[in-house]
Amino acid sequence: MKIGVLDLQGAVDEHLQMLAQCGVIGKKVLTVADLDGIDGLIIPGGESTAIMNLLQKFEMLPALRDKVAAGLPVFGTCAGLVLLARPDALAGFDGEVERNGFGRQKDSFQEDVTVAGFNKPFPGVFIRAPYLKSVGKDVQVLAKIDDDRIIAVQHNHILATAFHPELSVDTRLHELFIQMVTAAN
Ligand SMILES: NC(=O)CC[C@H](N)C(=O)O
C-alpha cells in the first residue's frame, strides 16, 4: 500500500512518522506525477490559503480534484479539512467551514475529544483550527466540541479532522484511514 502525503507546506514529516508507526511507508507528493500510483493521500495542516496557492502554481489542483471525485481516499487534517470542504478547492464533502474558528484566545489548545467508534477519548491538538458549522446530510459526523462545532467527519472515502492527530501519540485515526484505503483498493 502506498499512501502519499501532500508535501507543499505544513506538517508533512509528522504524518510520515505516524504512517511508519502503523507499518505503512508514506510517499511525499510534490508533483502531479507523484499522484499516480498512490492508494491514498494525506493533506496535512499548515495554511490552507498557502497550500491552495501552491496547488494552483504547480498545476496540481485539477488532477487532485479529479482523483478525489474518482474515489481516491483522502485524509485532511486542519488546513487539509478546509481544502476538502471548499467547493473551489477539492470539494471532497459538503460542509460549511469556519476558519480559525476558535479565535485568538484559544488559538492553540489540547482537548480530549470523543470520536464515534473509539472506545476512549482522542487527544485533540488544535492549532488555529477550523470547525464545521454544518455538513451535508450524507456526511458522517465523527466528533464535535462545545456541543455544536463539528471537528471530525467521514464522507465515503474522505476523512477530515480539524485537529492534528499526527501531533499526538495516538495512531487510531491514521489506522482508521489505512483501513479506508485498504477497503477502497
Ligand atoms: N493548523 C492549521 O492547519 C491551521 C489552518 C489554518 N487556520 C487555515 O485555515 O489554513
Image: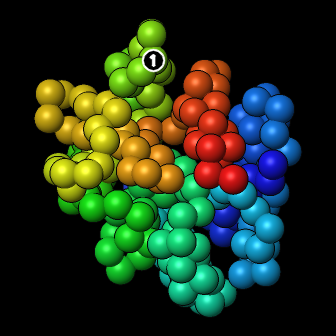
Closest to the observer: 25 or 78?
25
Give the vertical position of 53 relative to 181 (above or below). below
Q: Residue at x 32, y 31 (%)?
A: 143
- Which residue carries the number 1 mark? 118
Residue 130 place in picture, x, y as percent: 32, 50
Is residue 172 at least partly visible in the picture? Answer: yes
Would you place residue 12 above or below residue 165 in this image?
A: below
Residue 42 seen by the camera: no
Residue plotted at (53% across, 72% down): 70
Q: In percent of the image, x 38 and y 70: which residue is there?
A: 91
Q: Which image quarter: residue 97?
A: bottom left
Q: Is residue 43 left or right of residue 13?
A: left
Percent across and percent down for residue 164 are 51, 38
Residue drawn at point x = 81 percent, y = 39 percent: 24
In the image, 7: left or right of 123? right
Picture quadrant of residue 168: top right
* 44 sits to left or right of 121: right
Given residues 18 and 178, the one toward you in this image is 178
Mark 1 crowdedness (10 Å alpha carbons): few <14, some 14-19, many ≥20: few
Vertically, is 128 above or below 63? above
Q: Quadrant of residue 29?
A: bottom right
Residue type, mark 1 in image: Phe
Report the image quarter containing ligand 1.
Answer: bottom left
Where does the image place residue 74, in percent across and percent down from the top left? 56, 56
What x and y, as percent, mark residue 132? 24, 49
Q: Look at the image and name its color scheme.
A: rainbow
Question: SS at mark 1?
Answer: loop
